[in-house]
Image (cartoon, grey):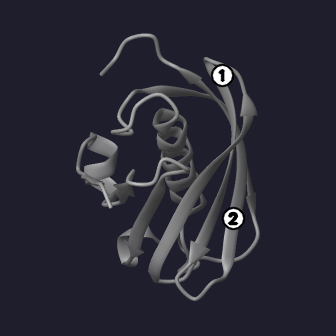
Amino acid sequence: MTLIHGETGTQSLIGYVLDVGDRAGAVCWLDLDARHLNRQGILHGGLAATLLDSAMGATGSLTVDATGRHPFTTLALTVNYLAPGHPGRVTATGRVTGGGRSTLFIEGHLRHEDGTLIATATGVFRKTRAAP
């Protein structure tokens, strides 16, 4: 495990953690509480997209930087919501499915700790030229 906590303002505000210890793909998790829920008492869709985007972007970074910190820009992100996210831990994962030297196609999955698949995503990510 190689954990990243509070590295960005967004990460600090929302409270998610990134694990970039596996070069095959990053993992992003969040312990859901009332701050993360919408009016229906389930995970806000925008936060689900944020978790997926973070895991997928860090997965792209791992292809060029073992620390998972080289910046990637999200060019496109499509999220499909499949089930409500209830309080508890949710985990987003990323996996590179194609691309070249600077642009990658990455898929993501967001699951609740009980195994429920909450959302899937596909995205296009581009390596940023400047190192962090």
Location of residue 85 with respect to 131 vertically, above or below: below
Considering the numbered disc 1 on the image, is that residue within a helix, a strand or a loop? strand
Q: How crowded is mark 1: few (under 14 residues within 10 Å), some or many (20 or more)?
A: some
Q: How crowded is mark 2: few (under 14 residues within 10 Å), some or many (20 or more)?
A: many
Locate the N terminus by quadrant.
Answer: bottom left
Which residue is denoted by mark 1 in the rendering? Answer: 103
- The reply to whether residue 55 is in sight is yes
**Furthest-bottom residue in this view:** 114
Q: In this view, does 85 lie to the left or right of 26?
A: right
Q: Where is residue 14 drawn, in percent x and y?
A: 34, 57
The total number of labels drawn is 2
Q: Report the Cα–Cα distance between label 1 and label 2.
A: 23 Å
- The reply to whether residue 78 is in sight is no
Q: Residue at x 40, y 68 (%)?
A: 30
Which residue is denoted by mark 2 in the rendering? Answer: 119
Q: Which residue is drawn at 41% across and 75% down?
A: 32
Q: Where is residue 97 drawn, in percent x and y?
A: 74, 42
Locate the C terminus by quadrant.
Answer: top left
- Residue type, label 1: Thr
Q: In this view, does 121 lie to the left or right of 50?
A: right
